[in-house]
Image (cartoon, rainbow, N blue to C red):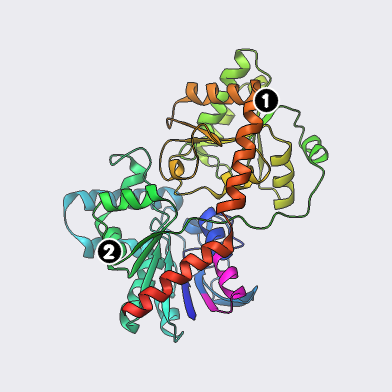
């Protein structure tokens, strides 16, 4: 098959959704299919509002995938301007003014240049697979291209639902134009049954719904965990967080939980891998020197370093309400580590509470602290949950199985066209 991926960013961009699209594309190519991925030139999240240095279209081949990258224009007012624009979109959605206005406004989320014109110059394709309902300009362009070419549109939305319908994160994924895009699709392929149930609750009704899940990439060549932990000044026991360190991802709550435990006499440290956001930077700047000793933001590390620290860690914690899946949980399980996540978004569809990890209410610092203490003070429980997680990864989360499920849906929508 000749498949067109349209996504707001693509590896080496390090986000979970981007990694998902890249891994799926590689697996489809390995199976003998042709994949063209049209995306932006963003290499880091800041590029989505500050624009990209390269302001021309770049074409390259990565692992057999034909990748076309379009530049991003700076958003007026930078990150604050983009957040204000998104809030205005939510106001428009609540006012009932309709889908057309929102579709126009969403063409700046993010402001990718020449995207539709680039798509028009490509093809032919058998179908379009669009990703990411929260940065939806790329998905809108793919939707229009599919309509113009009279070919099926398949959507993987990575929809986030937070803690319920009134959650800001849920509003950001379920505005009328977003529901229209998904309902117009030949198929919506979600990562968990929780995501499917929430979309149905919001009235999303494509021709097909299927739960596809996610996969775990091959682990990098091993580094000595003790050496890497020592390099970053980490001593056992420490918990690890991976992702953008901000409030929505639960980084601040995890840090507060560790500080609570340290005040109660527990020997615990939190290592954070990934870019920090302004809200986390403000929180961290307000800590004392003693408190900072227990909260260790390490920045962006190599995959090999990340996996070495996962192997050395006592547990993984990411009590987020803005994740539809969380591939980082799979990475922790691959090393036999128990995980702590929030009972929000798609995470309850990934973590089996009490079996391979612990679910806590989003934003409940005391509950996070209690979960961390359980896993630090009960080695048998820690090992059991970690091994259960390792088994789940081995049995359920591999890219060949994910790709086979995706291809089955592709074949079905092609027959129905």
Distance Cα–Cα, label 2 vs label 1: 47 Å
Q: Please state the horizontal and vertical placement of residue 239, each as a whole percent of the image.
A: 64, 32
For the image, the number of numbered tags is 2
**At x 64% / y 24%, what residue is drawn?**
376
User: Front-most of 391 and 363?
Assistant: 391
Label 1 Cα neighbours within 10 Å, binned few <14 / some 14-19 / many ≥20:
few
Kindly indicate the quadrant of the structure image that contains residue 147: bottom left
Q: Residue at x 62, y 27 (%)?
A: 381
Decide which of 400, 216 is in the foreground and name it. Answer: 400
Image quadrant of residue 238? top right
| Front residue of this view, candidates 214 and 180 | 214
Q: Regarding mark 1 in the picture, which secondary structure is present there?
A: helix
Residue 405, position in %: x, y? 47, 65
User: Relative to 245, does residue 38 appear above or below in the rendering?
Assistant: below
Query: Decide: marks 2, 1 in contact (CB < 8 A)?
Result: no
State which region is magenta: 24-36
> In terms of secondary structure, where does tag 2 sit?
helix
Q: Is residue 187 above or below residue 231?
A: below
The residue tagged 1 is 379
Residue 77 circle label:
none
The vertical placement of 36 against 361, above or below, is below
Question: How many C-alpha atoms fall within 10 Å of the one at disc 2: few (<14), some, or many (≥20)?
Answer: some
Residue 200 in percent (x, y) is at 28, 53
First in sequence: mark 2 or mark 1?
2
Q: In the image, which disc is placed on residue 183?
A: 2
Q: Is residue 327 shown in magenta? A: no
Q: Position of residue 306 (x, y in %)?
A: 69, 46
| Point 23% across, 52% down: residue | 93
Q: Is residue 26 magenta?
A: yes
As drawn, 168 above or below 407:
above
């Amino acid at each position: 098959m000749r498949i067109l991926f349209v996504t707001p960013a693509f590896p080496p961009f390090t986000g979970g959704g981007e990694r998902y699209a890249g891994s799926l594309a590689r697996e489809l190519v390995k199976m003998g299919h042709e994949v063209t991925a049209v995306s932006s030139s963003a290499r880091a999240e800041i590029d989505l509002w500050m624009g990209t240095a390269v302001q021309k279209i770049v074409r390259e081949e990565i692992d057999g995938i034909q990748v076309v990258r379009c530049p991003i224009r700076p958003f007026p007012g930078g990150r604050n301007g983009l957040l204000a624009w998104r809030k205005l979109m939510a106001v428009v959605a609540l006012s009932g003014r309709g889908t057309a206005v929102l579709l126009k406004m969403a063409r700046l989320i993010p402001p990718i240049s020449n995207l539709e014109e680039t798509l028009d110059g490509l093809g032919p394709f058998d179908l379009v697979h669009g990703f990411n309902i929260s940065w939806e300009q790329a998905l809108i362009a793919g939707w229009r291209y599919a309509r113009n070419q009279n070919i099926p549109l398949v959507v993987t939305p990575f929809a986030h639902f937070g803690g319920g319908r009134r959650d800001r994160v849920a509003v950001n994924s379920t505005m009328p134009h977003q529901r229209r895009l998904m309902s117009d699709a030949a198929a919506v392929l979600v990562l968990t049954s929780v995501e499917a149930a929430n979309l149905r609750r919001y009235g999303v009704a494509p021709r097909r719904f299927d739960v596809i899940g996610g996969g775990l990439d091959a682990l990098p060549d091993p580094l000595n965990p003790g050496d890497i932990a020592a390099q970053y000044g980490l001593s056992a026991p420490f918990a690890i967080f991976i992702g953008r360190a901000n409030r929505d991802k639960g980084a601040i709550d995890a840090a507060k939980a560790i500080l609570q435990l340290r005040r109660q006499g527990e020997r615990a440290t939190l290592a954070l891998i990934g870019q920090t956001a302004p809200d986390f930077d403000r929180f961290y700047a307000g800590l004392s020197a003693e408190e900072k000793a227990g909260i260790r933001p390490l920045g962006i590390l190599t995959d090999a370093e990340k996996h070495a620290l996962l192997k050395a860690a006592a547990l993984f914690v990411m009590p987020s309400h803005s994740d539809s899946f969380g591939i980082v949980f799979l990475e922790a399980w691959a090393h036999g580590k128990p995980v702590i996540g929030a009972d929000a978004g798609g995470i309850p569809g990934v973590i089996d509470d009490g079996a391979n990890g612990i679910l806590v209410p989003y934003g409940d610092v005391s509950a996070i602290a209690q979960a961390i203490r359980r896993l630090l003070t009960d080695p048998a429980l820690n090992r059991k949950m970690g091994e259960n997680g390792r088994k789940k990864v081995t049995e359920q989360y591999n890219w060949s199985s994910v790709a086979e499920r995706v291809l089955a849906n592709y074949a079905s929508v092609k027959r129905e066209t």
